[in-house]
Amino acid sequence: MILRPFSEHSFPCCKPTVIPAPPEPAGSPLTTRQWLALVHLELASILPPDRPALLTEHLVRRDGSPTDVFAHFAIDPQRLSKLRGNWDGLAHTAQVSGDSKNQDAKTPPWDGFEDISIPGSGGVQICGRLGRVRNAADFAKADCLVILPGLLGDNNVLRTRDLGNALMAHGFHVLALELRGHGETYRARPDVYYTFGVQETLDLLAVSRWLEQQSFVQETGLIGFCWGGNHALLTSWIDGATPDHPGIMEHIAPYYRDIGSQRHFKRGVMAFSPVLRFEKLMDELDRPWSRFEHPAFAGLQGSIKARMKHRNYPTPSTSLREIIEEDFRRSSMSYPGLMKDATRFVCLMDPQGEPGHNKLASARTPTLIVHAANDPLAPAQDVADLLAWTTNPMVAALILPGGGHIGFAAYATAYYFSLILSFFSRVRD
């Protein structure tokens, strides 16, 4: 079977269904959870026939314990990473994933986009591609949606370009961002290293502020895939947090002393396939995996090793833990306990199953997690475990029967794009 690249899909032609916002009593806007329940009810018919999706209210039992996600979908979690056990999930994952061989290659131009750089945290310029929609005379006044790639990804991942083109066709400005240590940002500042969310969260806040200062931007929204989804959730947390939040460790706190009270990404935050228990993924990638038996883990390990080679790190390996340690060691904020502190900072769930300081309780912007039951890299059960602790009505979650890891466009194109359009077109706080 030959997998058709996702770039051959044309979103503007899929006739997305945008659900109008239902009438609301004055002063009583819908929460994100209420909005999702109404919109999914309208969109569910365009999903492939399968077991029903799980929404926020389905993810927690009456006694407060998390739902058994794998039992609901009749999935053996031990087979999710195996080619013979999860063909559909792995196929959909492969159709939208980037090619590790493209790391550090310059991204070819995109029609309708321009390369720009935006002031980030600490004077670092963050590069990206901006696409602006026009009206008859000039650039339209519209919302701008920021798109983040997955772990170690840059704008060579065509999923970003395709989604950006589709969103522009439906009236949104789009910024495809390349964070520290990636793409043009890395080429401009190879001395600035990736901190896996510690400093990048501040960069994202700065990007939101910069965009809303532009005459053509109304409000901003954020979309992240895989670890980009984690970046999005961390941004939602920090946007509503105070500098003394217990999730901000002592040596990291000075960077967050002046976060202020300004709101960011008011249009909303969407996180597709976030890795909620990052420490468990690091553990998994400390051992070798066969590309023929466990292609998702092996593919990620290939990307890690390729990146370490491209960066001329002394002992390139397939360990996610080792590449993080190498980047932290070279970072300007490096100190002996940074790896431990940073891991605690970026984790949304502890390995033992407790929330990482219940970070999403602080979220004040509409925040939606979209996951697949057959995700081979980030177990869907983690979403239910997180929601069992997170009562914040501004945070909602959806677990679909299929889609693998960030492969929703390949699994259910019309539903995926309709959900995104409806979220950013209708959600208001």
Image (spheres, rainbow, N blue to C red):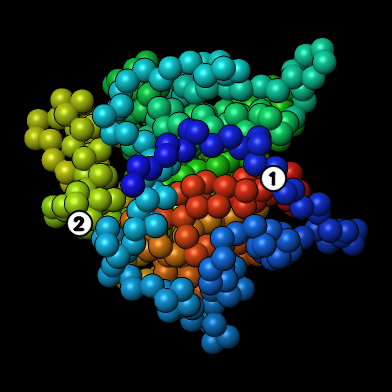
Residue 336 visible: no
| Residue pictured at 34% horizontal, 28% vertical | 181
**Residue 401 location, x and y as percent?**
50, 65
Q: Secondary structure at mark 2?
A: loop
For disc 1, the neighbor class at 10 Å (few under 14, some 14 to 19, many from 20) is many
Query: Left or right of 429: which side holds 109?
Result: left
Reply above or below: 358 against 75: above
**Residue 429 location, x and y as percent?**
75, 52
Residue nearest the viewer, comparing 122 with 236: 236
**Residue 264 location, x and y as percent?**
63, 40
Q: Which residue is mark 2?
A: 293
| Residue pictured at 13% horizontal, 40% vertical | 317
Residue nearest the viewer, comparing 245 with 272: 272
| Residue pictured at 46% horizontal, 45% vertical | 225
Mark 1 residue type: Pro
Mark 2 residue type: Glu
Reply above or below: 135 against 73: above
Q: Secondary structure at mark 1?
A: loop
Q: Residue furthest front?
A: 1
Query: Left or right of 299: which side holds 172?
Result: right
| Residue pictured at 65% horizontal, 41% vertical | 14
Instruction: Give the quadrant of residue 49.
Output: bottom right
Reply above or below: 10 against 68: above
Q: Residue furthest bottom?
A: 63
Marks 1 and 2 sit apart, C-alpha to C-alpha, by 36 Å
Q: Which residue is mark 1?
A: 16
